[in-house]
Structure formats: structure tokens, C-alpha cells
Amino acid sequence: MAAINQTPRHATRVQDAQERINNFKEVSLGFDDETMHEEALRCLNCKTAPCVKGCPVNINIPGFIAKLVENDKDGALDVISQSSLLPAICGRVCPQEKQCENNCVRKLKLGGSVAIGALERYVGDYGLQKGTADIKMPEKKGKKVAVVGSGPSGLACAADCAKAGCQVTIFEAFHKPGGVLIYGIPEFRLPKKNVVEKEIDKLRALGVEIKLNMVVGKTITFAELEEEYDAIFIGSGAGLPMFMNIPGEDLNGVSSANEFLTRSNLMGAYNPEAITPIYCGKAVAVIGAGNVAMDAARTAKRIGKGEVYIIYRRSREEMPARKEEIEHAEEEGIKFVLLTNPVEMIGENGRVSGLKCVKMELGEPDASGRRRPVAIEGSEFVLPVDQVIVSLGTSPNPMIKNSCKDIEFSPKGTILVDENTNRTSVDNIYAGGDAVTGAATVILAMGAGRKAAKAIIEQLGLN
Ligand code: FAD
Ligand code: SF4
């Protein structure tokens, strides 16, 4: 029996923390060719491949890594492409440590899990470098599909339907396509020009038309779409921010993380020369501890260059953000104020000047299985801040619900679908991504878009 490769996991290259807080360039720089190969050699090609079970779209992980061992990048790309359409994006933003890498047999005793995400990114970037020259426009077969929203669910559904011969049109409310990939996740984590826009170029090469500034339900109605298209996919996401509903939340200087990030990413406000600059305080409190909160905190640090605090009512272990994001935020000097809950936003002359908080302790587990935070009596204190960014999660915007009365929704406002086909209660209307699940992940949204596309293709008799 061959000896097991004992090499520990290779770290990816990153931009130095002190340097990167002064720019918006990508933080993680991925693997170079040599490190990629050495890391690929660590994979044990396990027969049972537990890593694959941890992947929401079941990428053949040992299969693509085996191709990398042979330096066959095209082969690796082919293997991944059978399951994932966005490897350069998912390799960068998927929470691998909770998915595939969490199941890797090397995790505990053999030098750490194989760096599956970094290898996937390497292959995805290779695919993007190849450009669109190899993409052949599929022959059209006379069926028309409308896609509402251009986030990962809409892009994936559009790509698969176009490949099957449908004439696909995406309707996007914003002036740029990509959904959260463009307006939510910052440039330093997911480059727009070199990654997201190149993925979208591939769709255009497949003949997909993208109509921007089109708010379905306002600019165009569902009835109009139903009249013209044979099937509709709704991938409108969950972009409506939740607030704390505590006194002072209407003060100047308080905003949702969604608004803050959209202004920075989509309107280019992080660039001081932008025509729509953004206010950024010298002491900023970001309430919440998910990916969105980390992105807002790290953006605020880069723009305002002052103190930035993450305020979270539970402990570090319960923080929902990706491990890498938490570590990068800490390296960049973001301060974590844990077991702390805001109770009031205090203002002076209409502008926020402090965040009144109470200290918390963890009690018995609640319905989610996590220990419930309980306020410690008499522990109130005021954190002096001049900006507060609220990042407590989002829910679907009610516009789709109000404009398409025939579709069934859950009490939380998410669209109800058949779990095998992602079909809604209306025969030719499908839905997927955050609009169905509530705020979730890129890979789940992409998987849902593909599942719906498969059902649409079957319904239209194109398979
Ligand atoms: P979205 O990406 O939300 O796209 C929906 C699109 O529909 C938008 O472009 C919107 O403008 C458009 N739209 C909405 N209503 C209409 C309408 N009526 N007419 C026309 N268009 C409409 N996930 C990860 O896996 N890893 C991460 O690291 C991560 N970080 C995140 C950071 C931030 C700041 C945010 C906000 C989310 C993050 N997520 C992350 C979550 C992930 O981005 C989402 O789960 C995913 O983008 C959902 O995809 P979607 O296609 O359902 O919708
Ligand atoms: Fe390779 Fe780890 Fe998957 Fe085994 S579990 S096949 S070592 S990536």
C-alpha cells in the first residue's frame, strides 16, 4: 500500500492586512500552479468520498482533483461543470469549512482538510481565462423563457435553459446584472470585472438577453410576461432588510447593511471620486455577525479608516459568518464586541452619537439548538459611535407577492415550490434561490436555478 502523503494543508496567498485596509483589491490571491499541484496531491481519492456528500450540488471532488494531479485543467473544469456553473465564484465565497471540507477525511489527523475551495477557484479562474471563444450559440427550438432577477439562481437557470435551446430573457431591476454577487459581496472578496462580469459574458455568448432597469411587477407585469413566455423563473432574492425596532433607529447615520453595501459596490461609492460618495463614520458599529455584517464592517474600515465594531448578542462560536471572513476581519482590526445587545440608538441634533447596549450571557438552548442569550441586569453601557449599520438578515421583497397574486407564499413571504421541480403553484412559473429559502448561499441558489431549469426543459419538451 502506498504511504499517505503527510504534507499539511497549504495556505492560500493573501494580501497583507495593513496594506489591504487601504484598498479594495482582492484579499485572497488563491494558489499558484505549484502550490495547486502539491495541494491536489494531498487528496486520497477516497472511495466513499465523504466530501462530495458535504457539497450542496455534489461536485465530483476527487474526480476534479485527480485531473489536477495530472495537470489536466480542462478535464478538471469538465468534471466541475457537470455540477456547478460558477466555480470561480463558489470557490471564493462558499462556506467550504462547513460543507465539503468539513467532511474531508484529512480534517482531524492528516494535516487538515484538502483545500477544496481553493482548488475549485483555481479551476474556475482557468475557465474564465479561456473566455467565451469555445462557447457555441445553441440552436433555438422555438420556446421562450423569462427569468426574473440576475443573481446566481437566475443566471444558472438562464444558462441551462439557453443550452437546451430556449430563447431566454433575464429581467433585472438594477442597472447591472449579478444580484448580490454585484451589489452585496464587496470587490475585495469577489472581483466584479475579472470574475462576475466574465461569468455573465458566458451567458451572453449563449444568446441570453439581459434587460436591465426592469422591475417585474412595476415596469412590466407578470401578466405581460405570461402572455409572451412559455415559462417563467423567479430568482428575485431576499433583499428586504430587517431592523431592530429599537428607539433611535431613524436617526441620521443609521442604515441597513444592504443599503450601505449597495451604495458602495453598485454605485462605486468606495471610490472618493464617485459621483455618489458615501458617508462613513470614524466609529462605526455593525450589528450582527453574518457574512453581510463582516462585509459591511470591512468596507467601513476601508472607507472611513476609523474604529469599526461588530456587535453580536451571542458568543464567537455562534457567529454565522464564514470562518475565513471572521479571521480576515480580525486581522484588519475590526473589534468584536460579543455577548452584547443594542437596546437604543442615542442621537444628538438628529444624528446618531452612541449605541446603548446591554451585556448578555448564554442560557438554555433555544429552538435553533443554540444557547439563548439572556440580558444581564444593570449591565447597560453606551458605545460612542457616529454610524450604525444594521445587519440582522433579510427577507424577500413583497413586490413579487403583490404583483403575482396566483402564486402561493409562506407566512414569511417566501415563495412555495415543489421541492423536486421548484415549480410554484402556477403551472409554468418556477422559483428558486433566496426568494424561496430566505437568505441562504450562492451555491444553494445556483443549485435551485439548475433544478428549475431541468423541470422547465422537461415541461417544454426539449430534453
Ligand atoms: P440575489 O443574488 O439576491 O439576486 C436577486 C436579483 O433579483 C437581484 O439582482 C435583484 O435586483 C433582482 N430582483 C429582485 N426583484 C426583482 C423584480 N421585481 N424585477 C426584476 N429583478 C428583481 N453566500 C455565500 O454563499 N457566501 C458568501 O460569502 C455570501 N456573502 C454574502 C454577502 C452579502 C453582503 C450578501 C447580501 C449575501 C451573501 N451571501 C453569501 C448570500 C448569497 O449572495 C445569496 O444567497 C445569493 O446571492 C442568492 O441568490 P439569488 O439568485 O436567490 O438572489
Ligand atoms: Fe480527497 Fe478529502 Fe474528498 Fe477524501 S474526503 S476524496 S481526501 S477531498
Image: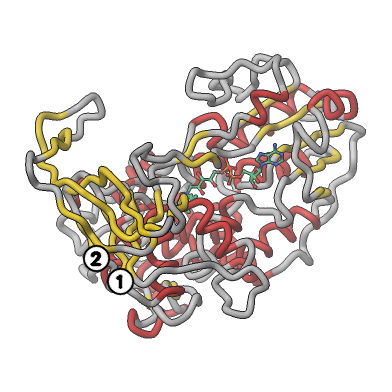
What residue would you read off at disc 1? 307
Q: Quadrant of residue 109?
A: bottom left
Identify which amino acid the numbered label 1 is placed on: Glu
Q: Residue furthest front?
A: 349
Residue at the image position 54 percent from the left and 26 percent from the top: 414
Q: Can residue 185 be seen in this view?
A: yes
Give the camera-side residue of 361 and 248: 248
Q: Position of residue 8 (x, y in %)?
A: 23, 69
Give the camera-side residue of 158 and 454: 158
For the N terminus, give its image quadrant: bottom left
Q: Quadrant of residue 355?
A: bottom left
Identify which amino acid the numbered label 2 is placed on: Lys
CA gap, disc 1 to disc 2?
Answer: 8 Å
**What's the colour scheme?**
secondary structure
Relative to 245, residue 68 above or below = below
Q: Where is residue 269 in the image (x, y as percent from the top left)?
A: 58, 69
What residue would you read off at disc 2? 335
* Classed neighbour count for the residue bearing mark 2: other residues with Cα under 10 Å, few (<14), some (14–19), many (≥20): some
Question: In the rendered structure, are the residues bearing label 1 and label 2 in contact, judged by CB atoms less than 8 Å apart?
Answer: yes
For the C terminus, give its image quadrant: top right
